[in-house]
Image (cartoon, rainbow, N blue to C red):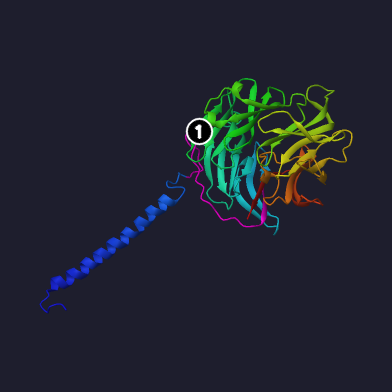
Amino acid sequence: MHSPRTTRFTRLLIPLLVGCLVVLFTAAAPRSQASASSIATSHPLRPAISTSCPASGTARAAYMPSMTLGSHSTIVYIVNEGTFANPTFGTLKRYDVVTGVKVEVVKMANTYIASAQVSANGQWLLFVAQSAGQVRLQLIRMDGQYLQTLYCGAGSPQGSILDEQWSTNQHLVVFLQVLQSGTAIYLLNVTNGALQVELPAVQTLTFAPRTWLDNTRVYVTLERTDSPPTILYILDTSKGANQNPQNLQKVFDGSSTPFCWDFDSSYDTTKLFTTQCTVDPNPNGPGAGNYHGPSVINVRPATGGSPTSVYTRNDLAFTSVRAVTSSTLLFTVGNTSGVTSQNGLWRVGTNGFNPVRLTGTGNQLNQFSQFPWSNVSRNGSQYVLGIVSGSPTSPTYTLEYGSMSGGAPFVFASITNVQLLVVGWTTM
């Protein structure tokens, strides 16, 4: 018990000291928790987010907080209104195949979206947008948040950003840049914003990125001036910047069928599937004539080697191939002479067994990315196709999806003079 002689000063001092200690501990606790949280998070220092262009010749790191995805299979696609030269709106949209609901992820005025792809985890969209002569490599989360610009080219055609490909670990983006000296392949590390030239420009030659084999190696095609791509190489980004094109690893030569060959790596990245068909000479000059059989799908080691036949047809023109599961290939048939009634999308086992024609309404797979989720739903049960019909001056764009088991596809978007392009699949 306190003595009755306790002074007023003492009575006031004790509560004051206690209050100060409470304030100190209260103030200290959040700082300690914030510090621990900062250490635990995958982004201890949040990069600056901006939709403006970084300084010329530089890039930004991406800020990519995760989100929780749903279970509904969802298709992402591009809607471009207006023309390439005079766009009115460029939009990235989602379509939920379970509910039929369409959602705009982002809609940008006076913008043309040239390309886009879905990240491996399904949470992000990487895309190239052009507006007022400025080309931007941009990123946005699937729910429409965190729009950011990673890199800007100098305009069109010089500075154009083409054929961008995103690694499955989501760390690296490789792309083709059009320069006054030619075309060069750039590598952007999105984790830190580091940008470097992987393959310098070489006059009369274009090396174009097609798809990642793994998280360091990229398949690139060689295209000479006024000629289609003819040779497939591997570019190993782990070997550093400014590589000599002569040191690239050659894995396939398609020069015997320059207008009709395609490829994809197997689902486990150990094998390379290729298609080749027969093309007649063009009677009116350079270029391709009619496409027809015979055709073949071959398989070989992912880094090149002797081929083994998987599936052949004497009457059909195989124009593209994609490995969409560990046991399933999708391929397209595009005869322009002979048997045209079998054109469309087909499915066949990686062993060549059980070929099935899925639909005859489309013969072009995703033009931006070759990863399985670019064409087939995350659970492997459905495909998506884009179809262009009508006249060149008034084209109609149609998007449809269907079952990998077969049956009639379902059209979920169709419009004339507005461009619709498939981006890929996620879940929401």
Asked if one can make out residue 37 in the rendered structure from this viewpoint, the answer is: yes
Q: Which residues are magenta?
A: 49-77
Relative depth, front residue between 248 and 397: 248
Residue 68 among magenta residues: yes
**Residue drawn where x is 63% and y is 47% of the image:** 92
**Residue in front for this viewpoint, 81 or 397:** 397
Front residue of 301/29: it is 301
Q: Position of residue 213 (x, y in %)?
A: 63, 36
Image quarter of residue 333: top right
Q: Is residue 45 above or below residue 68?
A: above
| Rendering coords of residue 211 (x, y %) | 64, 36
Q: Nearer the viewer, residue 111 or 358?
A: 358
Residue 221 within the magenta-colored segment of the rendering = no
Question: Going by the image, does 237 lie left or right of 17?
Answer: right
Residue position for label 1: 195
State left or right for residue 25 relative to residue 135.
left
Q: Secondary structure at mark 1?
A: strand
Using the rendered image of the protein, determine whether residue 359 is visible from the camera's viewpoint. Answer: no
Q: Residue at x 49, y 31 (%)?
A: 57
- The percent position of residue 168, horizontal first and vertical second, equals 59, 42
| Amino acid of disc 1 | Leu
> Which quadrant of the figure has residue 228?
top right
- The vertical placement of 164 against 99, above or below, is above
Residue 99: x, y in percent?
69, 59
For the view shown, which residue lies furthest in the right direction?
338
What is the quadrant of the N terminus in the image? bottom left
In the displayed image of the protein, which residue is found farthest to the left?
Answer: 5
Badge 1: residue crowd in 10 Å (few <14, some 14–19, many ≥20): many
Taken as a whole, is the magenta stretch helix, strand or loop? loop
How many numbered marks does the figure carry?
Answer: 1
- Quadrant location of the C terminus? bottom right
